[in-house]
Amino acid sequence: MEGTDKADTQEQRPPIPDRKQRKSVVFNSEALVVEPDGKIVTMASEETKDTALSHTPRTPPLSAALGAFTDAREAAVEDAAPPAEDGGLDLLKKKKKKPKKAEDAEGEEASGAADGAADAGGLDLTLKKKKKKKAPKADEGDEFAAKIAALDLDKEGAEGATDAKGDEQSGDMEKGTGIWSHDETKPISYNLLLSRFFSLLAQKNPDHASSGTRSYKIPPPQCLREGNKKTIFANIQEITKRMKRSEEHVTAYLFAELGTNGSVDGSRRLVIKGRFQQKQIENVLRKYIIEYVTCKTCRSPDTELNKGENRLYFITCNSCGSRRSVTAIKTGFSAQVGKRKKMQG
Amino acid sequence: MSIENLKTYDPFAEADEDTGESKQAQNYIHIRIQQRNGRKTLTTVQGLPKKFDQKKILKVIKKKFACNGTIVNDTEMGEVIQLQGDQRKDVQEFLVDKKEGLELDPKTIKVHGF
């Protein structure tokens, strides 16, 4: 709702990145405006600038175009002197917007899908990345951001107003002052109540936090780079011991998931072909734990994996005694990557 | 209830496949990623339902995600779509998308990789 009335006051408002709903709303109104002309026309919106930027980064036509339609605003920019953060933010917003337009060009019916915002967000990703690289490089990009930030200043003012309203609801919950005082009649905002709920929950049940799957900790995988193309997963032994799984099983899973292969070196470390970061290995291990370690019934990680009858693997939970079968690790299709040389030579 | 459970886990999937290629109800679509040289990657989409024309899908995907791709005929896995770059998320969303995608059940899609 907020988005709509803002769109009325200023049509080129960029969407707030973290709020999906508004984003979609703004997206719609804007798409309609920009789509017909395809490129840059009279629209005094950053969207148009955006196009200019994307087509010809750091070019005179761009700044010329800018000057043409944002003289007054530029003046405002100079004394506004927005901080660097704002610039970053705006760049983000810009990025958000750009791919949407690309999508529009592709299929107009797509643009109408306000509720497909999530999907659009996904699509954006690739384009977004490209943009990111371009914009910070060029100095003009920063200027842009500054200008856009200035354009958004009044919007931010409006935001600030709402923030201020939120700030009113202060006070110490423990002591029961401010908004928390007993005879306070003002309604407490949802966020405050929510945080109160969680803090109380944590207070009353200290053991809650310590038990459960969240707390299942394994040592972080240590990833070293061997040469240029191989990654050494150094503490696989430690981790597998912790999970009570065989090294082979974990290794097979890793290789299947990463679509690669590797070997075990002299000191029982795992050598994986390809470059992988610790984070990526962590992700795969997490998936492994979910699939092959935690008990689906009680979520306890205290389970055992063993081969049951007819070639199936079963997980038996030590804490609740449930037993479930798990799929064997399968390496799916793997494309030939760089094998051609070997085949020929 | 118990029957339902059996279905979701499909404990006989492996056994079936060992005996022969019997089509079980749960055919997952696997989206995988492979590293190529440098920071380049490859995305493979395996196990798309037969009712879809892979060529057409590829054509749409290529345009939509701005990447190249091919259809590889694998002896075991059948037709596999290969795409340049990490398109896992895009493809996943495309397959699930109701408006312009394939409207597949997200549960049948498995995204692999890091």
Image: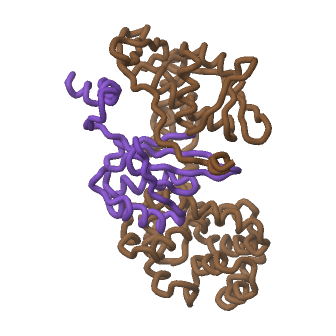
Q: Is residue A71 left or right of residue A286?
A: right
Q: Colour of chain A?
A: brown
**The N terminus of chain A lies in quadrant:** bottom left
Q: Is residue A287 left or right of residue B41?
A: left
For this rendering, which residue is in front, B9 or B40? Answer: B40
On the image, the x and y values in percent for residue A154 come to 61, 71
Which residue shows up at 32% across the image and 28% down it? B13
On the image, the x and y values in percent for residue B68 come to 53, 63
Which chain's colour is purple? B
Which residue shows up at 64% across the image and 70% down it? A153
On the image, the x and y values in percent for residue A253 come to 53, 28
On the image, the x and y values in percent for residue A29 come to 44, 75
- A180 shown above or below A155: above
Residue B59 visible to the viewer: yes
Q: Is residue A112 left or right of residue A22?
A: left
For this rendering, which residue is in front, B24 or A207? Answer: B24
The residue positioned farthest toward the front in the image shown? A345
Residue B103, by quadrant, is bottom left
Residue A261, by quadrant, is top right
- B97 shown above or below B110: below
Residue B9 visible to the viewer: no
- B35 shown above or below A262: below
Which residue shows up at 49% across the image and 49% down it? B44
For this rendering, which residue is in front, A255 or A45? Answer: A255
- Rendered image coloring scheme: by chain
- The mark tally for this picture is 0
Q: Is residue A30 left or right of residue A270?
A: left
Which residue shows up at 43% across the image and 45% down it? A187
